[in-house]
Amino acid sequence: NCTNKVQLAMLRLWNCAFGPQLYRFFDAGGTSQVYQQNVMESVPNYILGAAEFCFGIAKYGWPFYMPYVVKRVVSSTGERIRIRSVTYAVYSAGVLCLLACAVLMRGVGRVLNPTYSEFIAVLSRAQRSLSTENKEALSRFDFEFWAWPVEFDVASSRLRRPRQRPDRDGDAGGRGGPSDWLMKLCAAGLVRTVGVRLTYPGCTGLMNAVTRPFVQQARARLRSEHGAERYKLRTDSGYEIEVFFVDKRRSGGSGDNGSTLVVCCEGNAAYPEIGATGVPLDAGYSVIGWHHPGFGGSTGLPLPETEQEFMSTVLQFASEKLSFQLRDTTILAWSIGGYTASWAGANYPELKYIILDATFDNIEGLAVKAMPQFASGLVRESVRLEMNLNNAELLCRYPGPVKLIRRSQDEMITTGRPDELHTNRGNYLLLALLRHRYPNLVCQASLDALREFLAKRKTAEVQHYLTELGVSETECEDQLRQYYSARTAADQPYPSRIGTASATLASVTCSCSWLAKCSSTWRLRTALLSSLNCSLRHGLMLASCLARWQRRRRRRRRRRRWLQRRQRQRRLLGAYLNLNISETSRTRPKCFCFVTSKSF
């Protein structure tokens, strides 16, 4: 019995010394409290944190100080090298002894803390068997996520889908020269060391440390107000995903919104607890928030293939573990989260709909803008080979409903100034989607009109422009609704055949008249006739629209010629009478008076 007690005490000390750090806990009254460390725990944690920081600097800084070390070794004699080696060994042994004492002291301090002792006992039971009772007890504590037991492994999923490689432009190029291999090597090194951390700053330790208190407070609020549950998922490659889930089916939600699951994909420095999940939660939807690789408790680096693997695992978890069908699942994506949302739409076409907020078409233009001009070539090649986030191409493969939200003061996804709306990459995403879905309606004339429309900032300017073009949203919606109501089940949803000879008369008439009003160039005839294969009746209506436009053009031409003749007559009269024309008012530059030396 004495031996067993000693073994249990040593095991308890070991678990406390190497256990996860505890941040917050819920007391008996259900109130979230900050965990208070005693001195024997706080001081060792400070020492171990400083050692971890120094190790991180050494890990990423060795290419800079390694040449200095090699130079010192080469220029030193054998005796001096031996002395320095002994000195470094003594210093290293001293540091290891200090760290060992800190770990032991931390274990003793945690054993003496009743809150941590209770937590480590609950964690041990949950790691042995994660029953409903054990998970409910474990959910009272907020701690480092690496110790949370895995609840869903995609390797054992019955809905497992084959892994797919990310789209890379260089895969099908067939280039194999030495310069190409060197470029690929440089691109891979640049992306995996610096590029991925600049693209996703939320995966860095500094950003995680700065945002950790806010994330913990938000997580406690989600649990107390919405009953959020925490999960750990494991991907095919062994990466771990931190996920929280709010189930509104039990409370009914707002109307029937609780039966719809919203999967939120956050931005490059956002976390789901303090991100876009608040909007669907307030509307009564069931919500899943997941951390990008390297964010929070998730592991790995946010490379395209890892992002795809995370998204696939989350959707399979929602379908198998939470019993949400794909037709009842929607995706809300913010900023760079639009990549995973677009990929999910391309590979899971059964999704209900997708909402993309402040996202882009391709990351290449934004990456070139953020980096120095001299490195633009390497940046383009690196994006093309290793970080090809081509949202437009993926989104065009999704046949379901899509909603795009554009911000008018977005400095992140614009290649110019934030107030230059025509440089917002969300415009290009919309244009690519329209080209794919409505190829018979989108021509160069309509694209020019749409670009000018998207460049308008104020609501009054937008309304004036639409009035000038004669666009009626109600009429267009009615014609589109009539077209889709007449579409048979055998027809593909996209690309749409609206605008062809087999489309309804009303829909083609609306599209032709709208495109005719959107253009003021003579290329309208060629653009319309090449983009729309109209029937005879439709062609007559189109010819009528073009005839009216030609008459207005001839009237403007005759007006210009009359003004030119009048100006020539006035010049001749002035020369004959020796008239000197002087400006009489700067506020009215077209008002002149005649000064002459002759009398009439």
Image: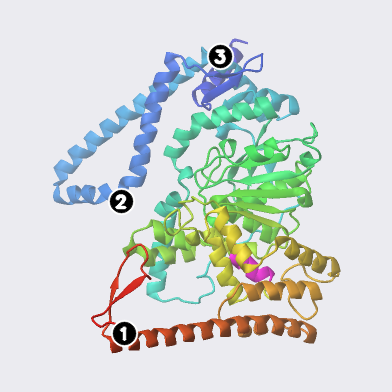
Type of amino acid under label 1 = Gly
In the image, residue 85 sits, relative to residue 382, either above or below, namely above
Coloring scheme used: rainbow
Q: Which residues are magenta?
A: 430-438
Q: Quadrant of the C terminus?
A: bottom left
Q: Amino acid at mark 2?
A: Pro
Q: Earlier in the sequence, mark 3 or mark 2?
A: 3
Separation (CA) of disc 3 from disc 2: 48 Å
**Amino acid type, label 3:** Val
> Is the residue 17 above or below the residue 239 in the image?
above
Q: Which residue is mark 3?
A: 6
Instruction: Reply yes or no: does residue 407 show up in magenta.
Output: no
Q: Earlier in the sequence, mark 3 or mark 1?
A: 3
Q: Is residue 88 left or right of residue 347?
A: left
Q: Quadrant of the N terminus?
A: top right
Q: Check the image and report above or below for 359 versus 179.
A: above
- In the picture of the structure, the residue carrying the numbered disc 1 is 574
Q: Residues within 10 Å of mark 1 (few under 14, many from 20)?
A: some
Q: How packed is label 3: few (under 14 Cα within 10 Å), some, or many (20 or more)?
A: few
> Of circles 3 and 1, which is in front?
1
**Secondary element type, mark 1:** helix
Of residues 351 and 467, the one nearer the viewer is 467
Residue at 77% across, 66% down? 480
Q: Nearer the viewer, residue 24 or 53?
A: 24
Crowd class of label 2 (few under 14; some 14 to 19; many from 20; radius 10 Å): few
Q: Residue furthest front?
A: 600
CA distance for labels 2 and 1: 82 Å
Identify the residue at image location x=36%, y=32%: 51
Give the residue at the far top of this rendering: 2
Q: Does residue 94 appear left or right of residue 446 in this picture?
A: left
User: In the image, is 72 to the left or to the right of 40?
Assistant: left
